[in-house]
Image: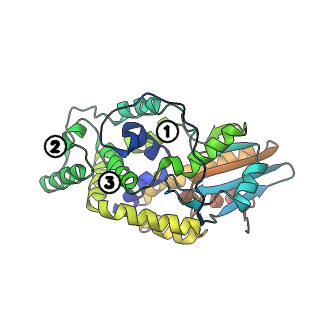
Amino acid sequence: MKKILRTLAATCAVIPLAQCALFPGGNAVMAVEPAQEVAAPAVAEGVDADPALWVVKDEDTTIYLFGTVHVLKPGLSWFDEAVKDAFDKSDELMLEIVLPEDQAAMAQTMIPLAMAQDGKTLSSRLAPDDRAAYQAAMTKVGVPPAQFDQFEPWFAAVTLSTLPLMKLGFDPEQGAEKQLTGRAKAEGKPIEGLETIEQQLGFFDTLPEFSQVAFLNAVVKDIDKIGPTLDTLVDQWSKGDPDGLAQTMNENMEATPDLAKRLLFDRNAAWAEQLQARMAEPGTVFVAVGAGHLAGEHSVQDYLKERGLTVTRVDY
């Protein structure tokens, strides 16, 4: 269970963005700042990256499938060549969720779901040794542990899995979804979501308590590995290596088939159903979802193929 739970936050685009809403600038102040109009940052020029891209098409419809990383460091030049060409040809952008312009509104959606409803404190849910390790980890990232006692374990876990990334230079503003959203808005392309913010947060909120606690304990134990693991994922993504990325993300998921089915495979199947329906409408769509959903077995591509659609990797 540990490894799938460690990658849990990476499967949902909403998590790093919501954490930025709660911790503006990556600091450890539990506050929501007023929304401000900020132009989407330009894609940083630097090291060439060639992430994988796929296409599904018929006589009058084309759907591009692009795997994203939700947070990136500046300096990767990925929005060029075939990726830019596919985006430029597209009439609309489809993401996991439509990124809200008001980060405060996102935080206000997240907090009620994150609050414990049974009156138990987070500390009381943990064994003594686990509690001590959790408190040390929270202190390490600059968050007073007592500040999270009223929240459910999943919320503390996603906080601990994202705040270190911000301190290491990973930035949701540099993430592929944010960049693509900014470009789509600038070019007047409509933006659709495969899921809602509430749905994505619900994947965490509806986990049973034992799974939430296991998730939190796993993040605490491997907190120093979070940055290096994401560095590896970004390197594999940049090289267009979905097989390597799948191995890194999904290692040992066979040991937790129910959880993997719920958090990855069922979502992939649902997205494939939506994309098949979209094929009935003419036009060109650029679909951008977390790269893990387009890698390995039970990927979105696999479910599209089960529906009789041909998925081809774009060679570039």
Amino acid of disc 1 = Gln
Q: Earlier in the sequence, mark 2 or mark 1?
A: 2
Which disc number belongs to residue 124? Answer: 2
Q: Secondary structure at mark 1?
A: helix
Q: Position of residue 40 (x, y in %)?
A: 58, 42
Task: Name the residue: 54% across, 60% down.
Answer: 75
- Give the Cα distance between marks 3 and 1: 19 Å
Q: Which residue is mark 1?
A: 199
Q: Position of residue 204 (x, y in %)?
A: 40, 44
Is the residue marked by circle 2 packed among few (<14), some (14-19), or many (20+) residues within 10 Å? Answer: few
Query: Could you tell whether 293 is left or right of 249 in the image?
Result: right
- Give the Cα distance between marks 2 and 1: 28 Å
Q: Which residue is mark 3?
A: 215
Amino acid of disc 2 = Ser
Q: Secondary structure at mark 2?
A: helix
In the image, is residue 72 above or below residue 97?
A: below
- Name of the residue lying farthest toward the right: 59
In the image, is residue 71 above or below residue 255?
A: above
Q: Is residue 272 visible?
A: no
Quick one: quadrant of the N terminus? bottom left
The answer to whether the residues at label 3 and label 1 have Cβ atoms under 8 Å apart is: no
Task: Name the residue: 69% across, 47% down.
Answer: 275
Query: Could you tell whether 244 is left or right of 84 in the image?
Result: left
Which disc number belongs to residue 209? Answer: none
Q: Position of residue 123 (x, y in %)?
A: 18, 44
Q: How is the image coloured?
A: rainbow
Q: Earlier in the sequence, mark 3 or mark 2?
A: 2
- Give the Cα distance between marks 3 and 2: 16 Å
- Which quadrant of the figure has residue 240? bottom right
Is the residue marked by circle 1 packed among few (<14), some (14-19), or many (20+) residues within 10 Å? Answer: few
Amino acid of disc 3 = Phe
Q: Earlier in the sequence, mark 3 or mark 1?
A: 1
